[in-house]
Image (cartoon, rainbow, N blue to C red):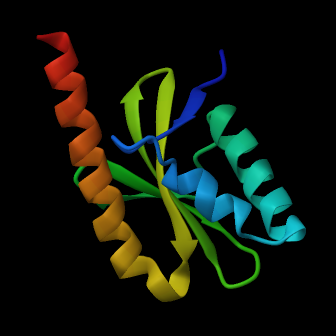
């Protein structure tokens, strides 16, 4: 089975929220997130659960309980929407769902 491609959501102004969040973390946290993303690319969903609206949460058991929010665009493509911690989980889920809706709307416009 082939790897899943992982891309980051890009805002209309060019800002890439997931990369900004990841870049603000310390090196050990970044390394744990990188490992989690590698596993996701290998189709390992053992720490993934749906949070509704087409958005899923990847739990990283490290530090404050990191979370990665993403949408599955196709069988072979994942879009990273947001990152956060257990403490901000409800706000981060809302943000991720908003970005996912925006991503899908922009994709639909490109098809026309």
Q: Is residue 93 left or right of residue 60?
A: left
Camera-side residue of 54 and 29: 29
Quarter of the image where one finds residue 47: bottom right
Count of labels in the image: 0
Q: Position of residue 107 (x, y in %)?
A: 24, 25
**Residue 12 against residue 32 in the figure, above or below:** above
**Image point (51%, 88%), residue name:** 87
Q: Residue furthest top?
A: 112
| Relative horizontal placement of residue 67, taking residue 100 as reference (left or right) | right
Q: Which sits in the foreground, 93 or 58?
A: 93
The residue at the point 50 percent across, 21 percent down is: 76
Residue 21 sits above or below residue 102 on the image: below
Which residue ends up furthest to the right in the rendered image?
28
**Where residue 29 sits: x, y (%)?**
80, 68
Q: Which quarter shows the N terminus? A: top right
Most distant residue in the left direction:
112
- Res 98 → quadrant: bottom left
Q: Pinpoint residue 7: horizontal percent, then vertical percent.
A: 55, 33
Query: Would you place residue 15 above or below residue 49 in this image?
Result: above
Q: Which quadrant, please, contains the C terminus?
A: top left
Residue at the extreme front: 13
Rendered residue at 33%/40% (across/down): 12
Q: Residue 9: x and y, percent?
A: 44, 42
Q: Which residue is found at the position 28% from the left and 68% from the top?
A: 94
Is residue 105 left or right of 13 when viewed as pictured?
left
């Amino acid at each position: 089975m082939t790897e899943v491609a992982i891309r980051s959501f890009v805002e209309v102004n060019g800002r890439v929220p997931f990369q900004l969040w990841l870049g603000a973390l310390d090196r050990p946290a970044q390394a744990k997130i990188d490992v989690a993303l590698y596993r996701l690319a290998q189709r390992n969903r053992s720490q993934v659960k749906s949070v509704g609206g087409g958005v899923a949460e990847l739990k990283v058991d490290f530090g404050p309980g990191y979370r990665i929010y993403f949408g599955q665009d196709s069988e072979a493509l994942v879009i990273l929407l947001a990152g956060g911690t257990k403490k901000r989980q409800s706000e981060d889920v809302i943000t991720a769902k908003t970005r996912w809706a925006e991503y899908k709307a922009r994709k639909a416009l490109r098809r026309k």
